[in-house]
Amino acid sequence: MSFIDGKYIEVDSGVELFVQDVGEGEPLVFIPGFTFTTEVFSKQVEFFSKTNRVIVIDPRSHGRSTKSLHGNDYVTHGTDLAAILQALDVKNPTLLGWSFGCLTVWEYLKQNGAEQIKSIILVDMPPKSLSIKENDWVEGALDDIAAIYNSFLRNSKGQREFITSYITQVMIQRELAEEELAWLVEQSLKTPYYIAGNLFASGMFSDYRETAKIASQTVPSLTVVAEHWAEVAGNYLKQLTPESKVEVLGGHMMFWEHSEKFNEIVSNFLNKIE
């Protein structure tokens, strides 16, 4: 996947999103997670563009998209996604969100309904990030989340330290080569720390439980969760979205580390809803 494949689409006055649109067939739309970019889905683009129209988006203030001082929240990201689908004349897509990209998917559905959507694939994100209930699937303990926001996302050095730790401890299971880690950190740092802080707060205070419940009852849904919280996530989803198919694989970035297995899981899901 190269820059040549990409185009810029204006979604707001002075705000352009970088989008890659390759292949032909049923559309499959990828939305990356917190501060990450189109480039992390290169293995999915290579695989699925042989059979599908694959669209990958750098959300507002991510990657090559405009760094905007406004709209760095998931309500706006949902609106941006609708603008992209309309601009590209995308009909009946499958939406695949990873991490906070799931919030973009849910927000789109909240604003627009699921009538124009074929299916959804949600990669490793609870629909409500924080809870005081012991058995809820959440992003982390409230004090830990507060510490990230108050201690790390206040300058570039803190952002770099946070994302480096998160990559090595949560996202990837194996030991990364130095250049692999540097590349992954570089993708995240394309979003400035002062915008990353806004996005982090927006994501952590989101609550899409009702939207997730309705969506799973309306369109075919697949949720892929990481191994480290498979039990709590599985029990939680069984209660909230029992219609959604659940698969367990790898760490938080399993689509990158275990791309062949991940692509197989997604392919099997898509083939069953043809």
Image: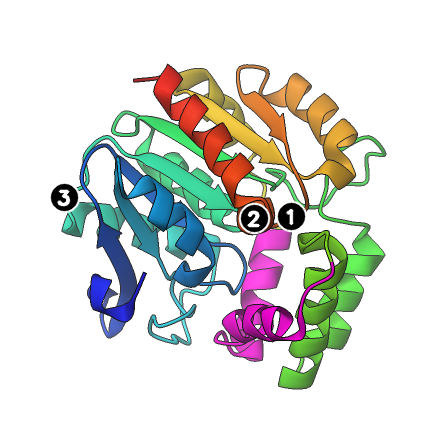
In three-dimensional space, the C-alpha distance between marks 3 and 2, rounded to whole angstroms, equals 26 Å
Please state if 136 lies on the left or on the right of 154 as rendered: right
Instruction: Please report the residue visible at 72 percent of the width from the left and 54 percent of the height from the top.
Output: 174
Which of the two discs, 1 and 2, labels the residue nearer the N terminus? 2
Which of the two discs, 1 and 3, labels the residue nearer the N terminus? 3
Instruction: Please report the residue visible at 19 percent of the width from the left and 40 percent of the height from the top.
Output: 90
Indicate which disc residue 70 carries: none
Instruction: Give the amino acid at mark 1.
Output: His
Q: Are marks 1 and 2 in contact (CB under 8 Å)?
A: yes
Residue matched to label 1: 252
Crowd around label 3: few <14 · some 14–19 · many ≥20 (10 Å):
few
Indicate the quadrant containing the C terminus: top left, top right, bottom left or bottom right.
top left
Question: At which x and y percent is residue 252?
Answer: 64, 48
Question: At which x and y percent is residue 262?
Answer: 52, 37
Q: Quadrant of residue 109?
A: top left
Secondary structure of residue under mark 2: loop
Residue 150 appears in view: yes
Instruction: Give the amino acid at mark 3.
Output: Asp
In three-dimensional space, the C-alpha distance between marks 1 and 3, rounded to whole angstroms, equals 31 Å
Which of the two discs, 3 and 2, labels the residue nearer the N terminus? 3
Instruction: Please report the residue visible at 62 percent of the width from the left and 22 percent of the height from the top.
Output: 240
Crowd around label 1: few <14 · some 14–19 · many ≥20 (10 Å):
many
Secondary structure of residue under mark 1: loop
In the image, which residues are magenta? 175-204
Q: Quadrant of residue 126?
A: top right
Question: At which x and y percent is residue 83?
Answer: 23, 51
Judge whether residue 50 is colored magenta. Answer: no
In three-dimensional space, the C-alpha distance between marks 1 and 2, rounded to whole angstroms, equals 8 Å
Instruction: Name the one closer to the observer, 98 or 150.
Output: 98
Indicate which disc residue 99 carries: 2
Indicate which disc residue 89 carries: 3
Residue 7 appears in view: no
